[in-house]
Image (spheres, rainbow, N blue to C red):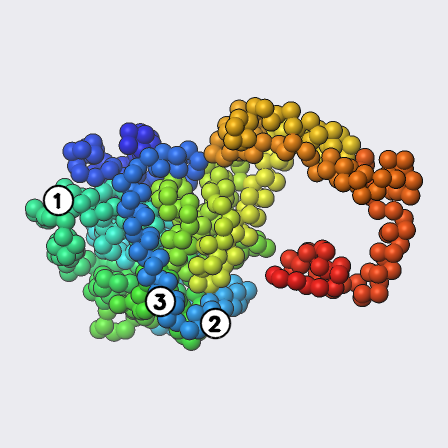
Amino acid sequence: MMRVLQHREGLRHRGASGHAAQESPEEDVGWTPGIHPPEDPLRWGDPFPKAAHAMLQDTQMRRNLKYATGTIKAKRQMRVDETPDWEDLRQAASEIKNYTMAHLPELLDQMERNVRARGGIVHWARDATEANEIIYNIVASKHVDEVVKVKSMVTQEINMNEYLAERGISAWETDLAEMIVQLADDMPSHIVVPAIHRNRSEVKAIFEARMGDAGKLDDDPRRLTMAARAHLRDKFLHAKVAISGSNMMIAESGTLSIFESEGNGRMCLTLPETLISVVGIEKIVPRYQDAEVFAQLLPRSATGERMNPYTSFFTGVTPSDGPQEFHLVLVDNGRSDVLADPVGHQMLNCIRCGACMNTCPVYTHTSGHAYGSVYPGPMGIALTPQLAQAWDHNDPDSQMPFACSICHACADACPVKIPLPEIIIDNRKRYTDYNHGHHTIPTGWDIGMAAASKVMRDGKLFGEVINQGHMARPFAGAKQRFGFLPLPVLSAWTRNRDVPAPPAETFRQWWEREGKEAHPEASTGKGTNPVGKGAGPSEDQRTASAHNHNDQGSHVTQSRVATSGVSVASAVSGQEGEQ
C-alpha cells in the first residue's frame, strides 16, 4: 500500500473542489487518497509499466474492480444472449459510423445549420484551450460563480472543471459516480463508472468528510444515494447555467441526446436558463433512424440494461420550455488528425460504452489510473496516443499501446465492431517507426536488433548459432526453464516470463539426421540436392511430386493454405481434413 500512496503522492495537484490541502493519510479519512486532477488529462503520471506495477499493490482497489467489472460483464452477457439480432445490430452500427466518418464535414455543417435554425448558437473549438475559453466567456457573461454538469468525457478531456475553478467558477458534477470522484479530489478510472475503484465504505467516508450537509452516514447504498440526492437538489434549483455533453448528435434535425440512469441529466437539461453542450465532432449520426440502433446497443453494452432509465433528446430553444439560451461547442482537439489516419480513424466510431474495459484482462487488474489518461483500457490505448500525438519514447503516453496482450476480447465486446487490436498494433508500429528515425544514440533495443539481423540474414551463421544453444541447457535447472536474464533485450522479456531451455537437438540437426536415415545415399551426395547440411528430396522425387501435383489441379493453391489453416500435407493430398 505504501508504494501506491507514494505513486499517487507524486501525481498530486490542487483539484477544483479545493480539498487537496486538507488531504489526510488513508487511515484518517477512511479511503485511499486519489489522484488529483492533473494539468493535462490525456497525459499524466508515470509510463504504464511503472504505474501499473504500483497500482497492482493496491489490493482493495483490485477487489473493488474485480467485483464491479465482473458484475457489469455478466449483466451485459445476459442482455446479449436475449437479443437474437445482436450481431446484426453491431454490423448496422459499424456501417452507420463508417458512413458518418466518411461524410463527417458535411454532417457537421448540416448539424450547425439545423441548430442555428432552431435558435441555438454554435461554436467551433480547435483544441482544449479554445473550448475552455468559449465556455468560460459564456458562463462569465451570466455573472454566476457556479454551474451544474451532466457527465461528459470531453469536458474531462479538456480539463474544463479545473479551468473554470482557476477563474472562480465551480462546476458541480451531478452524476453520482462523478460527484464521488470530484469530492475525493480524484480522477475517474472508467469512462462509464468513474468511481468503479471505490467501494461503499469509501464512499461513506468521502461523503461524511466532503459533502458538508451529509451528517453521519452508514454504508447502505440507499442512504448514500438519498444523501447525494438531497445535496444535489439545492444545486439544481439554484443553478442558472448547466453544461452537458451528448451521446450522439443527429444531423438531420440538429438534435442532441443524453443517455443516463439517474435523472440528473434531465434536471440539467430542463431547469437552468442557459445550457452549454460540449461535444466531440465525431459524436454524430446522420438520422433519427440511426439513433434507434445505438439506443439498443449502448445501454446493454455499458451497464447491462435493456434501456436507459432516462433518455433525453433536445433540439434548440423552445419558448417558455427549458433553457432559453442554448450553446453547442464542437470540439476537435486532435480528432481531425485521427480522422486522417488510414488505420486509427476507426477509433472515432467509439460510442464510449466501456465494454472493452470490462473484458480486458490488463485493465481489470490495474484499473484506469495506471494508464495516465482519462481514456483508459483498450479504447484508451488505441485513442489517447493519437489525440496526444504521443510517439516519442519520452512521452508517458507512448507506452500505452504496449499495455495489451492482443487477446481480442475487446474487439469481440465492442458493439460497433471496432478492430481495436489492429489499431493498437498500428500504434506500436508508429511508435517504433518514429523512435527509430529520431534517435541519434542507439538504444539497447537498436543494438540487440542490429546484432540479431546480422545473424538471421546469414543462413550458415544462423545455423551455427542455434546449434550451440544446447550448451545453455545445464544452466536451466531441473525444470529446464530460465527465469530473469539480465541481458539487453532479454531482460525486458524475461522480467515477467520464463523461457524454455533450448532443445537438446535443433530442427536442422533433426532434419540432417532424418534425411540420412531415410536416404543413405545422401552421405555420398548421390542423387541429392542438399539444403544447407541436410539431405533433401532427390531430383526424381521432385519430378514425380510435381507431376502428381499438376494432376490434382494445384490443390495447394486452391485450398489457400496460408489463410484457411489446412495443413500442407492434406492440401497436397487433395483432402481438407478436420478444421
Residue drawn where x is 84% and y is 56% of the image: 545
Image coordinates for residue 92, horizontal then vertical, percent = 48, 70
Give the residue displayed 36% in from the left and 34% down from the top.
Answer: 54
Label 1 Cα crowd, 10 Å radius (few <14 / some 14-19 / many 20+):
some
Circle 1 residue: 208
Measured from the top left, where is residue 391 in percent x and y?
53, 40
User: Residue visible at 37% across and 62% down?
Assistant: 77
Distance of label 1 from label 3 (alpha carbons): 36 Å
- Which one is earlier in the sequence, the residue at label 3 or at label 2? 3
Residue under pointer 3 = 79
Type of amino acid under label 1: Glu
- Which type of secondary structure does the marked residue at label 1 adopt? helix
Q: Which of the two marks, 3 or 2, is nearer to us in this view?
A: 3
Residue 15 visible from this viewpoint: no
Q: Tag 3's secondary structure?
A: helix
Quarter of the image where the N terminus is located: top left
Q: Horizontal and vertical percent for residue 41?
A: 37, 43
Task: Answer with left or right where residue 210 lies relative to residue 192.
Answer: left
Q: Which residue is mark 2?
A: 88
Where does residue 319 sit, x and y in percent of width and height?
A: 25, 74
Q: Above or below — where is 452 with respect to 514? A: above
Of the two numbered discs 1 and 2 in the rendering, the one whose residue sits closer to the viewer: 2
Which badge, 1 or 2, is on the more N-terminal residue? 2
**In the depicted view, which residue is nearer to us: 8 or 302?**
302
Check disc 2: other Cα within 10 Å, few if <14, some if 14-19, many if 20+.
Answer: few
Q: Looking at the image, which residue is at 12% across and 54% down?
A: 223
